[in-house]
Amino acid sequence: MPAEPLFSIRNLTVEYATRAGAVKAAEDVSFDIRREEILGLVGESGCGKSTLGKALMRLHRTPARITGGELLFDGRDLMKLTEDEMRAVRGAEIGMVFQDPMTSLNPVQRIIEHLTETVRAHEPRTTDQEARERAAVLAEKLGIRSERLKEYPHQMSGGMRQRVMISLALALRAKLVIADEPTTSLDVIVEAKFLDLLRELRREFGLTILLITHNIGVVAEIADRVAVMYAARLVEIGDVQDIFASPKHPYTQGLLRSVPNIQLDGESLYKMEGMPPNLLHPPRGCRFHPRCPFAMEICRDYSPELQAVDGDHFTACWLYHKTTGKEGAKNG
Ligand code: SF4
């Protein structure tokens, strides 16, 4: 029995207004983030995964805007909240960790002041002393010694700044942390420590984590489930072991075959043919059809919906559709 969802994203569409026209960077995307799971969201650069991550917190700014969908987080539709109400949700209920959180930290404020001030802004009844102590205890847990909290952000490494952002989310007792490419700038040792830390936080604090990454290896190591995006749409989602053992969507199959593997002695690495489409003029039908070795006639005109292929494993591909007719298919 799958765990209850903490966040249900329904038919989410995010558009960028450009001079050449509207670009849908995420289109009609629906999935659940279950309580206390680590969900990996993967796909090539430009597939819409980071846009989606920001939209979940309504953090997108002009020229991007959400043009449709529901964001049902812990019993509320975030789309119906005012900007003030949303500000209270950000940080306190949903934390975000970026590749380099320098932009989220005030460069002229010491870390401890930033932590204390943010906790006090969300919880005015908490005294400075209590906020400082809570932040220090959590930072220590994350391997930041208390004397380092007196430093400014630029005195810390990227990995250390990420830990500051996580300790902030924990100090505010966030239920969900969205981590966008958190390991991209880390070396392999620091990356391994960071992944251990996420596992521990989930275990100890019951944290739910959405991990956005292009690094399939990181997802294999840490995630419970994985969601795959291609050209602004979700094409596959399921248990990480199922998807790695038996990927269904031809794009996921190509993505997994493109990962370097030291056991493939002497074999050259698989290279997926073609390029991701221009989202200003995406292909009709299944967006992967110009690159897909299994494309059929129906794929060129009709877009397949996500359908269950095996228990908790869903994919959007005509090869697995229960109805092979065009019923229920969306044009374009
Ligand atoms: Fe390939 Fe058709 Fe499946 Fe798209 S729907 S991935 S083109 S087989």
Image (spheres, rainbow, N blue to C red):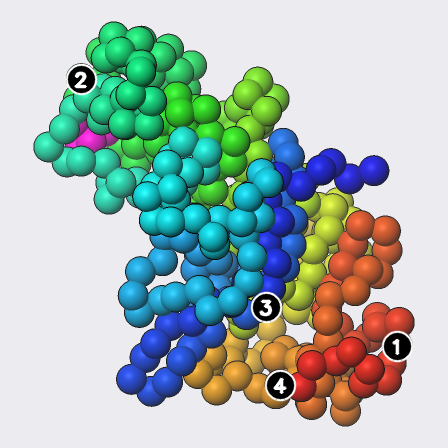
Identity, as a three-letter code, of the amino acid under mark 1: Thr
Instruction: Name the residue tied to disc 1.
Output: 323
Among the 4 quarters of the image, the one containing residue 120: top left
Please say whether residue 215 is visible from this viewpoint: no
Say whether disc 1 or disc 2 marks the residue closer to the N-terminus: 2
Residue at horizontal 31%, vertical 60%? 61
Vertical position of residue 36 compared to residue 103: above or below: above
Instruction: Name the residue tied to disc 3.
Output: 28
* Image-based side of 96 in relation to 240, left or right: left
* Image-based side of 288 in relation to 307, left or right: left
Q: Mark 2: which secondary structure? A: helix
Which region of the structure is painted magenta? 152-156
In the depicted view, which residue is nearer to us: 198 or 311? 311
Residue 150: image tag: 2
Residue at horizontal 67%, vertical 41%? 5
* Image-based side of 303 in relation to 188, left or right: right
Instruction: Name the residue tied to disc 4.
Output: 332
Q: Nearer the viewer, mark 3 or mark 2?
A: 3
Q: Main secondary structure of the magenta part?
A: helix
